[in-house]
Image (cartoon, rainbow, N blue to C red):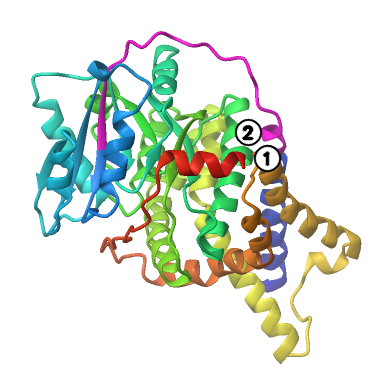
């Protein structure tokens, strides 16, 4: 019975790995045909902030420099339970500081839900809502790209999330590599196939009418994934805009990174429990590969957990019990096939960097320790499984003040 279970799970995990690798191949080419529209959509730009006095000023300066008619967008900073000078700095830059105080409902999802209600009550109504984090920097053409997608029928749009500090440490470099891979070989591949993309927490755009119809309703620790699943279940698929870049600050230390990723995985378990089976059933019933693919993405946290547990069991079996005593299909495959599979997996990350024309020299050196970052996801996910009912939001402190010009100059140097 145990052998049959192990073999079945190994076959499923192998099939998923081949499936994901096959999809990544469709991100190798970037299609150039795109339609540009004259600026016509109006935007409410929301910035989620909690004690961000060190970085919010740089973003306010950045948002003033967007290449989009200023009369077509307004900036609203959600000063959520702030105890510092965030609101004062926002006002100094002539932007709207929207102060929210609620010690019980803490976190970005709740803050956004509150802000949207405030927004709907204003005399002026906007065509769309764009969301950034306070530590971000937006490309000058960001709103232009969102306007293009909205004019061509997009209702939920995710921009390209890049890293503004990939050379600060080995851990920020690891984030950078991961996001270049995700943007190119996950997001772009599905965009090219006209399938649904997934939201990434910042650099997001939503049609106002859709938000009013659906409501926000995404208050878990991963509000982006939650809204992705909610909208997909209603047949509204997020799309990806490769040219709408937003630069995000990544944690400098492994400890801060682990805390952030633990929160992500705890939230992923919550969303997977709620949406995986309903979305999977919809995909099967409607014969929708798009919904099946999103359901699989939502369940990825369980795939990581299962891989970790099976690897641990086989390791214990071999070391402590003079195994193998448990069936292992990989042991019957040619050795070269195993090396090929591992090599192909590693190569995809390097390939993504080459395709994205990454110029950061230190990041290539940091690739030597990148496997440590990848392997660390396993114990983090394992711990998250047992603490997934912890709904306490944890703030990631941001201190890295970088201007857009600095980021762009390093990318071309």
Front residue of 334/323: it is 334
The region drawn magenta spans: 25-46
Q: Residue furthest top?
A: 38
Asked whether, in this view, residue 153 is left or right of residue 71, the answer is right
**Residue depicted at x 44% and y 16%:** 148
Residue 306 percent across, percent down from the top left = 58, 65
Residue under label 1, please give it. Answer: 24
Kindly state the secondary structure of the residue where label 2 is placed.
helix
Relative to 39, is 14 above or below? below
Residue 214 percent across, percent down from the top left = 26, 29
**Occupied quadrant, residue 232:** top left
Image quarter of the C terminus? top right
**Residue depicted at x 19% and y 37%:** 93
Residue 57 percent across, percent down from the top left = 26, 45
Relative to 254, is 270 above or below? above
Number of other residues with Cα within 10 Å of mark 2, as a class: few under 14, some 14 to 19, many 20 or more = many
Residue 251 percent across, percent down from the top left = 43, 61
What secondary structure do most residues of the magenta stretch adopt? loop
Kindly state the secondary structure of the residue where label 1 is placed.
helix
**Occupied quadrant, residue 328:** bottom right
- Residue 169 shows which numbered tag? none
Residue under label 2, please give it. Answer: 189
Q: Is residue 28 magenta?
A: yes
From where the camera sits, is residue 334 visible? Answer: no
Label 1–label 2 contact, CB within 8 A: yes
Query: Separation of disc 1 and disc 2 at Cα?
Result: 6 Å
Asked whether, in this view, residue 88 is left or right of residue 257, the answer is left
Q: Is residue 221 magenta?
A: no
**Residue depicted at x 73% and y 64%:** 7
């Amino acid at each position: 019975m145990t052998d049959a279970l192990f073999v079945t799970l190994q076959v499923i995990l192998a099939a998923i790995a081949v499936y994901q690798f096959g999809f990544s191949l469709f991100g190798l080419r970037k299609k150039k045909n795109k339609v540009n529209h004259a600026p016509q959509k109006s935007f409410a730009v929301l910035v989620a902030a909690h004690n961000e006095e060190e970085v919010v000023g740089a973003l306010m300066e950045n948002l003033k420099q967007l290449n989009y008619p200023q009369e077509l967008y307004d900036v609203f900073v959600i000063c959520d339970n702030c105890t510092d000078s965030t609101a004062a700095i926002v006002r100094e830059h002539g932007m709207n500081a929207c102060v929210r105080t609620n010690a019980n409902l803490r976190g970005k999802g709740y803050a956004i839900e509150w802000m949207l209600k405030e927004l709907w009550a204003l005399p002026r109504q906007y065509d769309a809502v764009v969301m950034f984090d306070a530590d971000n920097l937006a490309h000058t053409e960001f709103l232009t790209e969102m306007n293009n997608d909205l004019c061509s029928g997009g209702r939920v749009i995710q921009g390209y999330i890049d890293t503004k500090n990939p050379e600060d440490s080995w851990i920020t470099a690891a984030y950078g590599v991961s996001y270049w891979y995700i943007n190119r070989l996950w997001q772009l591949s599905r965009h090219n196939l006209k399938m649904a993309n997934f939201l990434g927490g910042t650099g997001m755009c939503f049609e106002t009418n859709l938000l009013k119809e659906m409501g926000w309703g995404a208050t878990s620790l991963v509000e982006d994934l939650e809204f992705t699943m909610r909208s997909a279940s209603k047949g509204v698929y997020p799309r990806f805009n490769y040219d709408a870049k937003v630069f995000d600050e990544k944690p400098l230390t492994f400890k801060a990174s682990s805390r952030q990723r633990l929160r992500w995985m705890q939230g992923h378990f919550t969303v997977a429990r709620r949406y995986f089976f309903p979305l999977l059933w919809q995909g099967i019933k409607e014969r929708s590969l798009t919904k099946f693919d999103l359901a699989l993405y939502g369940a990825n946290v369980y795939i990581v957990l299962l891989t970790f547990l099976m690897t641990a069991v086989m390791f214990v079996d071999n070391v402590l019990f003079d195994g193998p005593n448990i069936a292992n299909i990989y042991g019957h495959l040619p050795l070269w096939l195993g090396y090929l599979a591992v090599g192909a997996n590693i190569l995809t990350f390097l390939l993504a960097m080459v395709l994205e024309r990454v110029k950061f020299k230190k990041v290539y050196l940091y690739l030597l320790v990148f496997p440590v970052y990848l392997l660390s996801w396993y114990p983090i996910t394992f711990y998250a499984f047992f603490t997934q009912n912890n709904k306490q939001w944890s703030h990631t402190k941001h201190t890295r003040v970088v201007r857009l010009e600095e980021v762009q100059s390093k990318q071309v140097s």
